[in-house]
Amino acid sequence: MASETPGAGGTPVNKRTVDDGVARQPGMTDVARLAGVSAQTVSRTLSGHPNVQHKTRAKVLAAVEQLGYRKNNAARILSSGRSRTIGVITLQTTFYSRANLIFGIETAAHEAGYSVSTATTASLDTAAIESALSRLAEQDVEGVILSVPLVHVSPRIEQLTRSVPTVTVDGSRTSATEVVAVDQTLVARLATRHLTELGHETVWHVSGPKEWLDAASRCAGWRDTLVEDGLSVPPVLEGDWTPASGYRNGLVLGKIPDVTAVFVASDEMAFGVIRALHELGRRVPQDISVVGVDDIALAEYCSPSLTTVAQPFAEMGALAVAHLMRYIADPAATPEPASVEPVLVVRGSTAAIESPAARQP
Amino acid sequence: MASETPGAGGTPVNKRTVDDGVARQPGMTDVARLAGVSAQTVSRTLSGHPNVQHKTRAKVLAAVEQLGYRKNNAARILSSGRSRTIGVITLQTTFYSRANLIFGIETAAHEAGYSVSTATTASLDTAAIESALSRLAEQDVEGVILSVPLVHVSPRIEQLTRSVPTVTVDGSRTSATEVVAVDQTLVARLATRHLTELGHETVWHVSGPKEWLDAASRCAGWRDTLVEDGLSVPPVLEGDWTPASGYRNGLVLGKIPDVTAVFVASDEMAFGVIRALHELGRRVPQDISVVGVDDIALAEYCSPSLTTVAQPFAEMGALAVAHLMRYIADPAATPEPASVEPVLVVRGSTAAIESPAARQP
DNA sequence: GCAGAGGATGTTATCGATGCCAATAGGGGT
DNA sequence: ACCCCTATTGGCATCGATAACATCCTCTGC
């Protein structure tokens, strides 16, 4: 018995027993005592172990109910070594893409009996990401979904991802991780080709920040498509994903007479571009066609409604979770990239080019 | 000593010692051994305890670095009883408001040295919310931020919130919780009065789902303002926050000749309304003025740009965390509601009513 | 020069649940 | 009727870090 204190006269002080006025949360021992069984049996009952008699199970559940017992996660993790938690690392933003991706991840994870712990990083430098990984490691996550649009993955990060099952979403591939991604090259191709097929002689591009892999890939896909089709490649205008940056670039584009078609790397920027073109008196889509990327909820309800390339973020989240689960179950499995298909959604912001005659009033 | 095994010949089996091919994560004991000190000293060093010699601290830190040691959260929580985590309960949506609120909460919580665990609920019924609370309880959260737009709070929930410090955000007040909220009545008043001051004879309203407290409050504020001003109160059109529902209601409004001003309960719905009005040939703002709520990023960049009432979500999150921290520190403190001010942002979707003469072409 | 104060560090018990093993209790086969 | 097998249940050690307590040591004040 623990009460065999060496020399001292009093009872050993118990952290929780000291009277702090608040009733202690009931523990498994309390439930066991009330149900007249051992703590072990309570544990088995609650974790759905098959070998427990109905009668016993009922007694335990009754006791649990009566005491309002809730299992203690920390103890469970410590003891079992399994946290049933996965971690997600994303940039600290409020982008549509991030919200939807996390939505998909949480839904799928909960279905698989896992909970999700998110660690956001405010910047893309190695130290920040490393610290996010650390935070997750402290929580004993069994796997990590890394959704950081890094073009370059530092060796340090690469090494860290080696110690825990990791799935990369729409980010750079490291040799240690699986990748789930939308083929951004294809995104760009769909958008660009849609415009060239409408007769536009070339397509301009407003890109995202070039440090973002998605931005870079879309830019490359756009360029390649134009080259393949033997069209000239105009200079790239770079934005920062915000509507405001789209607006600024739109003001520039609107002043260039040649421009008849623009592929904008995000819907939010596209709205900014269209706004600027309007102000300059250029009509969309009659004078200039615009295509965005993401298919945010508002894309359909603005004037003109926005032609865009939809990315199935929620699906991607679910797919990432599925891969991660597989990876957790068998860490020796070989990484196997997966991709989900983007879809071109044609709406009102794109149109066939007017005949040259019509363009000279 | 623990190594005094009773009868068996072999060493007692250690879960972690069984050779599973993977190196065990280093623990505090390993660090202590390498640094030549006790585990306790390591603990003190890492938790910033003042009474540790520089030299010792340095040795410990070196050992930590060398082994790549990371503290184990589960063990820390179990032992100390403090999780340094707060929980957030929200609806499982991708709304702008939710994303920004959580953004604010996470930022503020991290600054205070806390991490955030979110539990989303797919529905508003008591059972779902109760289960979310349970999930958080299992994680030993020290406090909860409840951001659920319930009009009615069940006694069961009320009771649960009594057992852990809780701050309600923009939701119904329970006697046990503090509330941080934007005064939704004021939101409606700002929007409505803005329109009446522009000369509109009355203001129509597209509301959110009436089960949502915010929706109900905005509706009430709108009605009260009209009544105060002695204006007639048109019937309410109810939406579900989606642009599509705004569009549907817009199609109705556009067919009513009397309508010259509409207060829409969210920006997303407002875009839908405007879109519908356009299609019906009603101009915004010349024929009909529209005001939204939220001030989403795109509000400024659509045509016309949207007049709206901005809600400082991030600030709200920060304020909620501040209150929660105070509450955690002193659970006996009396609840003290706080509110943040909404701001009317006038843009291009509202205009003074044209003179009656001008309205008859 | 000595006692007392307080700083630095080690020792031990403990948090709550689980894994492994032992013990006990029925049930069926021969 | 006997024995083995399996379904159920209890006992004990353990996960990793911390609080409380014990100890040792050094520095100050009279």
Image (cartoon, coloured by chain):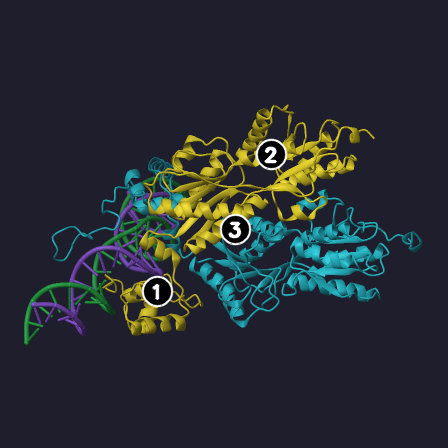
Chain colours: A cyan, B yellow, C green, D purple
Position of residue A106 measured from the top left corner of the image (x, y, whole percent): 54, 49
Check disc 1 and give the amino acid type.
Leu
Q: Residue furthest right?
A: A357
Q: Chain of mark 3?
A: B
User: Quadrant location of residue A50?
Assistant: top left
Q: Is residue B353 visible?
A: yes
Q: Earlier in the sequence, mark 1 or mark 2?
A: 1
Side (left or right) of A141 relative to B81: right
Q: Earlier in the sequence, mark 1 or mark 3?
A: 1
Q: Is residue A114 visible?
A: no
Judging from the image, what secondary structure is the residue with disc 2 in?
loop
Chain under disc 1: B
Image quadrant assignment for residue B159:
top left
In the rendered structure, the answer to whether residue A53 lies left or right of residue B256 reads left
Residue labelled with disc 3? B103
The residue singled out by tag 1 in the image is B46
For the residue marked with disc 2, what is the amino acid?
Gly
Query: Camera-side residue: A157 or D13?
Result: A157
Local crowd size for mark 3, using a 10 Å CA cut-off: few (<14), some (14–19), many (≥20) = many
Query: Tag on residue B249?
Result: none
Nearest the viewer among A28 and B64 is: B64
Residue drawn where x is 79% and y is 31% of the image: B358
* Discs 1/3, front: 3
Q: Earlier in the sequence, mark 2 or mark 3?
A: 3
